[in-house]
Image: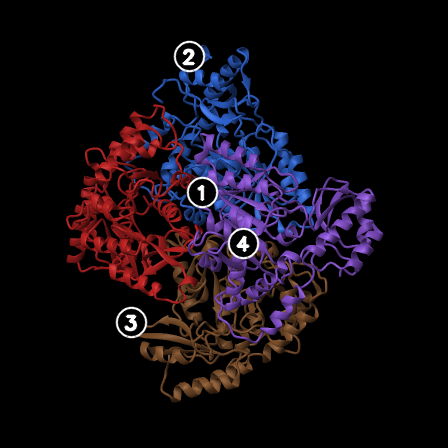
Chain colours: A purple, B brown, C red, D blue
Amino acid sequence: MNGKNSLCFSSDYMEGAHPAIIRRLTETNMEQSAGYGSDEYSESAREKIRSACNAPGADVFFLTGGTQANAVMIDAILRPYQGVLAAESGHISVHEAGAIEFGGHKVLTLPHENGKISAQEIKDILKSYNTDLNREHMVMPGMVYLTHPTELGALYSLSELKEISKVCRKNKIVLYLDGARLAYAFACPGNDVTLPDIAALCDAFYIGGTKCGALFGEAVVIPKHDMIPHLFTMIKQHGALLAKGRIAGIQFDTLFTDELYFSIGATAIEAADRIRKALTEKGYDLAFSSPTNQIFILLDKEKEKDLSEKVEMGFWENADKDHVIMRIATSWATQREDVDRLIELL
Amino acid sequence: MNGKNSLCFSSDYMEGAHPAIIRRLTETNMEQSAGYGSDEYSESAREKIRSACNAPGADVFFLTGGTQANAVMIDAILRPYQGVLAAESGHISVHEAGAIEFGGHKVLTLPHENGKISAQEIKDILKSYNTDLNREHMVMPGMVYLTHPTELGALYSLSELKEISKVCRKNKIVLYLDGARLAYAFACPGNDVTLPDIAALCDAFYIGGTKCGALFGEAVVIPKHDMIPHLFTMIKQHGALLAKGRIAGIQFDTLFTDELYFSIGATAIEAADRIRKALTEKGYDLAFSSPTNQIFILLDKEKEKDLSEKVEMGFWENADKDHVIMRIATSWATQREDVDRLIELL
Amino acid sequence: MNGKNSLCFSSDYMEGAHPAIIRRLTETNMEQSAGYGSDEYSESAREKIRSACNAPGADVFFLTGGTQANAVMIDAILRPYQGVLAAESGHISVHEAGAIEFGGHKVLTLPHENGKISAQEIKDILKSYNTDLNREHMVMPGMVYLTHPTELGALYSLSELKEISKVCRKNKIVLYLDGARLAYAFACPGNDVTLPDIAALCDAFYIGGTKCGALFGEAVVIPKHDMIPHLFTMIKQHGALLAKGRIAGIQFDTLFTDELYFSIGATAIEAADRIRKALTEKGYDLAFSSPTNQIFILLDKEKEKDLSEKVEMGFWENADKDHVIMRIATSWATQREDVDRLIELL
Amino acid sequence: MNGKNSLCFSSDYMEGAHPAIIRRLTETNMEQSAGYGSDEYSESAREKIRSACNAPGADVFFLTGGTQANAVMIDAILRPYQGVLAAESGHISVHEAGAIEFGGHKVLTLPHENGKISAQEIKDILKSYNTDLNREHMVMPGMVYLTHPTELGALYSLSELKEISKVCRKNKIVLYLDGARLAYAFACPGNDVTLPDIAALCDAFYIGGTKCGALFGEAVVIPKHDMIPHLFTMIKQHGALLAKGRIAGIQFDTLFTDELYFSIGATAIEAADRIRKALTEKGYDLAFSSPTNQIFILLDKEKEKDLSEKVEMGFWENADKDHVIMRIATSWATQREDVDRLIELL
């Protein structure tokens, strides 16, 4: 793939789509359908998602990517005087090129543990805001942004999520969950958070498709119908409305047929567990504690150079002047032989 | 498709993709590639487009839709004090839900003929601005936005485009062309504007995929390399960056292989010509003069109701309280038998 | 003033403040007060304005200029998917350098008569929007913006204002009135719209100070308390919050003491009436029909050049290639002798 | 002032203006002048400022407040993909209600010492950005924002400022200095940074008026002529253009006559020094090290309550659940007797 070697673990979006998706896109290709998500495939996908979420009244929209989903939802939900609370490591804090600020909102960052923020931190910052006599000169926290799994691969427990939800509801701020890699949480033995839990505890969230078996696409879910009036128009305004909406609809319809979304991550987790075991045995330092499909290795630069000759990893960040954090990501498409080869050369 | 009837001419984005595209997406599906457009398919597509444009140094980016392409490019090119000149009927003026204003820019509208604006109108408004002693309190025109074909199906002639380009260059304002339906222009016998002409005369433009045979996708072309520094980051900031960039790359690579893009519109134009002929013979009023794949019929509301029982057309706009303008669109996917049936029932 | 001549009628903001204002600023200068409008002078001014508006629960904020007031209020009231309806000649449409678009909102323009829009035009555009099947792809009208007097000096009658208010309330859109020159309306014999009328019929408006006797300042009034939560913070966010809020408070407190605001425009109207009479007698063409303190003369360019040698007028706009529209403005500060001199030389 | 007591040290913007300013506003009140800063007083003020800055070609604009000046300048200078580096304690980071994000830009925060950031920190973050392989997905640092004195009262030394300037120029990023309280720096014996130094080392800055003797007003200086084309229009677009521009012009003309701006802070510094000495002698804890006109005291909440019965201080922030940081500010208007009374009751 990169010319240097054929072994590649740099991300979980290197392949196309799950074969079942490609098959259905092919089968339905010459059918005619209405545009902008009003087709029957999109409606079927929405219905299956509502059912999987145990949220029969939910509004569901299909967008094309995670940054887009985050920006649309944050802009649609917040009022101009509000900002969004997120981990310092959050995707919206670091890797969205200022998309949230482009929409006029400040990201108010919190310390994190493996990408997770705690109910206590949220409580503290809200208390600090509420007791600050200068608060009318400051950005009001209006939303909490979580990722599950986090950017660093960690998972919230159900009890942590419940606590955070409780704080948000008590303080009347919106809880939003970015589920870019949600399928990998659901495939993880240590995860105890279900889709109905998320729908019950969050005010809005998205179910990731791009990294979980689709060509592209994220399903935004708003459990309470019409919580965001005219969201369709705001999606259009963000340039996020697909003309051929069914292309996303068919993909999510497939992912939510026969519970594919809940099984699609299994291969990735199994592979990641094997790699983690091998890394630990061979004395590598893991930068973050992650039970999901992403593994972050702390390497000195020389070792990194050596290893990168043999396997393509993803650059995460420079740790210090001599060390770098590299990411190994597995996915639904990871091949057993590739994992074998990787383990061998570690 | 709409439950009432199976004959549907409401838009040119009702089917999936040209079969060659679906085929290549299937063939390449399990290959691994780098993300965000840095893969070899995207690079190949870019190279073919540069070649087709006779613009070897051009920057090319693949976005997912027309509103997105327009918003990204206008925001990336204009300075805060500038606005964009467009026909009153322009897509950015009417049907993008305020996407341009969301990015902070005013759309300065001009009168039009079948969606076309003239060099003279542009000259006049620039002169008016330049001689207005209050101009520093006003939005400065910084760009001209054209569509080819226009939203109403009309085509600029090469000489018209040259004149407009000359005015823009003389006044140092950017000329941008929205080619959402460009393939239908190229398939039209009356068109004398080529892709190299557009690349030579415009500062930026996009070659439409969504309505011209792709599942989705628009190829933004900037003939002069690095005219817009950091455009990649601004694309990301707009939530417009595809993680699996190759999905767009493969589509455009296919469209620009064996000149598919230049032949794909022929079926649509032939079908539209037959329908236009039938409409004229049967005494229908056409609302706009269009030689391309869109036909706009002025109907009294009763007639519209009757006709809509038998064929699905697209609502364009209310003409007055008794009349409505309906759109018939053909496409690369239009079936000859469907045209026969349509003509019969007119 | 301009080096060429000492007779100047170019605008109504050429002098400082009404002497009573300067006096009170001087008297109170070394007093200490709390910042950001929480001082007792601001509170007194707010109370007097509430009383003059017959709106005891009104929220009142003091901003520094008209464009700022318009931008803050429009941004604070509209949701992202909404735009504001205004006359094509409206200040927000033409002369605010895109301030409304900078905040993300489209100005949806309507034809006008001397700067006035009609209830019927508003009804028509709302009906057009509501019956447009593509409306979810369009900007929703969320507010009507009026100026009284208009930019061209005209006045709404009470019955016109009532009709417009009725349309807005029926359609649940906000009615906002820009009263930059409101004092000149109140001083005009033909005006039948009172401050309590405006407070009863509009959802928000501002009482102009800058052009009506203050050094600077506009009093934004929202008759219904807390209609706009956190407006203070949004004012700060717009850079529109005065640290020494009392400087505006003292000015409005003075303007609303002994009904100064209702008498301050009389000199201006009397002067304008004399000038209008002279112009008509001498055969000048007036470009717009205005009973207030602004007079717009249509002049051929030669005549304009001659006249501008002797009196400084304000450039309004180029009418055509041979004619220009020039503005003569009177104000609370206009001197009788200057009017005599002007009439003589016409 | 607050009903409880007459001794007030809560801020440096409690009084009106320096008597010389009020006098000149009064003297010139009925003169006529052109609007929007094109009057002769504004021109004279600009000329004096250019001269004081030793920057004969500088562009100078007068705005009404600090948040406004910061927002206008940052929006005018940065490109959409860029953000601004600032101390975590910076005014733009904390107390501008998201004004910078409203304009679309991220504030990238750095750790600080008494509000100061170091050349090394800037170098480090630039290096980190430049070596981050994901940087195109991130906000690019495009400007460094400093305050002098800082929000916490500290001063940069000339050598520190030179180092920072060097880093900025080497990296081609803009250095901007917020001089809201600049007069108090100039009055401080420990300050070795002059106005010509600032003009030589920074690309843009503002000289604070509001807190330094004016009713309101900040003078934005851009040493290199036309570095920001069309800034006038962007000022208008931000609602920041004063119609009666001369009101700001006269104030700055006065402040820069007979070097008033350089002497006006002396009283404040002398008073602050006396208070600091007394606080230290009496065993109070100072929260930050400040040689200028602001003093920050760390108090337990009971002590704070006691003290606030007798003197009004400004709330700064909650330090922890038992302690609060209160601010004592002196100004050009501070009375010696008030300082005596304050010291007595400490």
The residue identified by callout 4 is A53
Of residues A207 and A200, which is closer to you in this image?
A200
Q: Chain of mark 1?
A: A
The kind of residue on which mark 2 rests is Arg
Picture layout, residue C232 above or below residue A103: above
Asked whether residue C21 appears in the rendered view, the answer is yes
Q: Is residue C303 left or right of residue B126?
A: left
Across and down, in percent, residue D334 comes to: 42, 20
Q: Indicate the position of residue D323 as horizontal and vertical percent values.
A: 52, 22
How many neighbours does mark 3 have within 10 angstroms: few (below 14), some (14-19), or many (20 or more)? Answer: few
Residue D125, percent from left and from top: 65, 40
- Crowding at dot 4, Cα within 10 Å, few <14 / some 14-19 / many 20+, comes out as some
Per the model, the C-alpha gap separating discs 2 and 3 is: 79 Å
Say whether residue D13 is left or right of residue A187. left
Give the amino acid type for the residue marked by disc 1 in the picture.
Tyr
Q: In this orientation, which residue lies closer to the viewer: B297 or A266?
A: A266
Residue D341 bears which disc, if any? 2
Instruction: State which chain disc 4 sits on.
Output: A
For mark 1, what is the residue? Answer: A81
Q: Is residue B203 visible?
A: no
Q: Could you tell me the amino acid type at mark 3?
A: Lys
Amino acid identity at mark 4? Cys
| Residue A11, image quadrant | bottom right
**Residue at (51, 22) in percent of width and height:** D295
Q: Residues within 10 Å of mark 1 (few under 14, many from 20)?
A: many
| Residue hosting label 3 | B321
User: SS class of the residue under badge 4?
Assistant: helix
Q: Are marks 1 and 3 in contact (CB under 8 Å)?
A: no
Residue drawn at x 42%, y 32% as measured from the top left: D210
Label 3 element class: loop
Say yes or no: labels 2 and 1 on the same chain: no
The answer to whether marks 1 and 3 sit on the same chain is no
